[in-house]
Image (cartoon, helix red, strand yellow):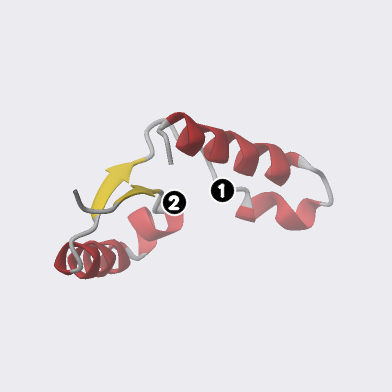
Amino acid sequence: MGLKLAFYPGCLVLQRMPEYEVAARAVLRALGIELEIVQQATCCGSPVVESFTADWVYLAAYNLALVEQMGH
C-alpha cells in the first residue's frame, strides 16, 4: 500500500496559482503518493496573522483537527 497524504492547497493556490497544485499532484503521483483532499477546510489564517489577534491560531487548529479526523 502506498503513502496517502492529506492535501490542503489553500485558497491562494486554488485561486491564484493553480499550476502549483497541478505540479504538486503530478510529482506526488509519480512518486506513488495518493492525496486525500481536506474537506471543509477553512482559511489557513495567513491573511489575519498580522492583525495582532489569535484568530489565525483558531483557523489553523481547525484545519489540523480535520486532518487528524482523517487519520493523518
Which residue lies at the image location 55% right of the left edge and 40% below the top edge? 64
| Relative to 16, residue 10 above or below | above
Quarter residue 72 falls in: top left
* Element marked by disc 2: helix
Give the distance between the C-alpha atoms of the residues marked 2 and 1, in whole angstroms: 7 Å
Q: Is residue 20 left or right of residue 62?
A: left
| Relative to 27, residue 29 above or below | above
Q: Mark on residue 44?
A: 1
Residue 62: percent from left, percent from top: 59, 34
Which residue lies at the image location 34% right of the left edge and 65% below the top edge? 17
Question: In this view of the protein, which residue sits in the foreground, 19 or 15?
Answer: 19
Q: Is residue 37 left or right of residue 25?
A: right
* Element marked by disc 1: loop
- Mark 2 or 1, nearer chain start: 2
Amino acid type, callout 2 = Gly
Q: Is residue 34 left or right of residue 40?
A: left
Question: In this view of the protein, which residue sits in the foreground, 27 or 4?
Answer: 4
